[in-house]
């Protein structure tokens, strides 16, 4: 949620345009009357709040609403359920859309990665990914807004969200244009590291090198992830290919299968690029990170051996435009 400016203590500030969609809200809505700083109740949670209310408020010069922090979960639910409409709404600012998409993605990913093989998880991820596709298709400003948020976020699940958003953009840039194929790609990207949920938290977050044992286990995360998602018959094959093959390299020195060249699924080759880029450029609790230019320079050394040349070139263009 956009809380860049101070909201009254205990409240969350909202852009009133969020309520342009005609949907019931499940939380109390407050406004702060002009010249005061104390929120007063405007509509109770059981009463509809729709476009008419929003318009009336805007005419009176009110463009923001507030909700209680304790209603944050209900707000999250509302945003998740209506994300696609919010993204399609031309009156909501791109920066606000990026923030909502990102926050919803983080929250949802954190939940589904620990119970990935349920119908409910798959349905919610599917909807999220479709919203992400709609968002990326808004154009280059949208992509860059997402990059701005990405750079400063090292929360645990941010990586899956980053690989999904940047990956959909790269997949589109290299010619995968159908919404279905982009959504399948996005699903694989969200879950690409799901196998890591079977690796100890300590090994994942501790600074310094892994023990031989931990490293062996770490190299199995694509295969473990593949097995987890194979339990679901409705999970797309091409999405599973990302999970299994995102650490393969063109020269056959990757893992877990040591696949070579074209034998690696194109989606997995796209994911490999954004996966590496995100790992190199994201701020972490410890250790260094690179800026965009330095990361691309470092990756350039591995074009042909690790990364596909044409995909790498498109990625450079995407970041530069
Ligand atoms: Fe991975
Ligand atoms: Fe990854």
Image (cartoon, rainbow, N blue to C red):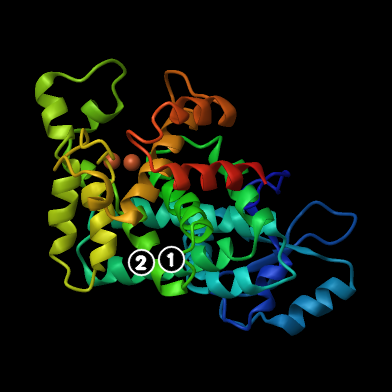
From the image, tell me which residue sits under label 1.
182
**Circle 1/circle 2 CB separation < 8 Å:** yes
Q: Is disc 1's CB within 8 Å of ligand 2?
A: no
Q: Residues within 10 Å of mark 2 (few under 14, many from 20)?
A: many
Q: Is residue 294 above or below residue 239?
A: above
The CA span between labels 1 and 2 is 5 Å
| Rendering quarter of residue 219 | top left
Q: Residues within 10 Å of mark 1 (few under 14, many from 20)?
A: many
Image location of residue 177, percent across then percent down: 49, 69
Q: Looking at this view, is 141 or 81 the one in front?
A: 141
From the image, tell me which residue sits under label 2.
184
Disc marking residue 90: none
Image location of residue 310, percent across then percent down: 46, 47
Dot 1: what SS?
A: helix
| Rendering quarter of residue 187 | bottom left
Please report the residue visible at 50 percent of the width from the left and 65 percent of the height from the top: 133
Image location of residue 152, percent across then percent down: 55, 35
Q: Looking at this view, is 32 or 295 the one in front?
A: 295
Please report the residue visible at 39 percent of the width from the left and 60 percent of the height from the top: 186
Residue 128 located left or right of residue 293: left
Dot 2: what SS?
A: helix
**Quadrant for ligand 2?**
top left
Please report the residue visible at 35 percent of the width from the left and 56 percent of the height from the top: 267
Q: Looking at this view, is 60 or 132 the one in front?
A: 132
Residue 253 located left or right of residue 80: left
Q: Looking at this view, is 55 or 166 the one in front?
A: 166
| Rendering quarter of residue 112 | bottom left
């Amino acid at each position: 949620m956009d809380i860049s400016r101070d909201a009254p203590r205990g409240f969350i500030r909202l852009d009133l345009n969020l309520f342009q969609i005609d949907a019931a809200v499940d939380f109390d809505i407050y406004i702060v009357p002009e010249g005061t700083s104390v929120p007063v109740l405007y509509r109770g949670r059981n009463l509809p709040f729709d476009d008419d209310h929003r318009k009336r408020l805007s005419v009176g010069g009110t463009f923001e609403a507030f909700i209680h922090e304790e209603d944050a979960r209900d707000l999250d639910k509302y945003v998740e359920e209506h994300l696609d409409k919010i993204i399609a709404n031309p009156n909501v600012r791109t920066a606000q859309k990026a923030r909502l998409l990102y926050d919803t993605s983080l929250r949802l990913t954190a939940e589904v990665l620990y119970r990935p093989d349920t119908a409910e998880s798959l349905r919610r991820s599917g909807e999220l990914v479709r919203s992400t596709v709609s968002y990326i298709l808004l154009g280059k400003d949208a992509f860059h807004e997402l990059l701005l948020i990405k750079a400063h976020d090292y929360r645990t699940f941010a990586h899956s969200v980053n690989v999904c958003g940047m990956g959909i953009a790269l997949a589109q840039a290299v010619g995968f244009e159908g919404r279905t194929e982009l959504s399948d790609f996005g699903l694989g990207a969200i879950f690409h590291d799901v196998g890591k949920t079977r690796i100890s938290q300590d090994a994942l977050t501790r600074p310094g090198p892994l023990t031989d044992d931990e490293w062996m286990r770490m190299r199995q995360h694509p295969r473990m992830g593949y097995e987890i998602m194979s339990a679901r018959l409705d999970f797309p094959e091409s999405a599973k290919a990302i999970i299994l093959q995102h650490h393969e390299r063109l020269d056959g020195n990757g893992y877990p299968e040591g696949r070579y060249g074209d034998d690696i699924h194109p989606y997995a080759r796209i994911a490999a690029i954004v996966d590496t880029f995100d790992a190199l450029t994201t701020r972490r609790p410890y250790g260094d990170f690179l800026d965009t230019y330095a990361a691309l320079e470092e990756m350039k050394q591995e074009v042909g051996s690790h990364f596909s040349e044409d995909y790498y070139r498109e990625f450079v263009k995407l970041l530069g435009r």
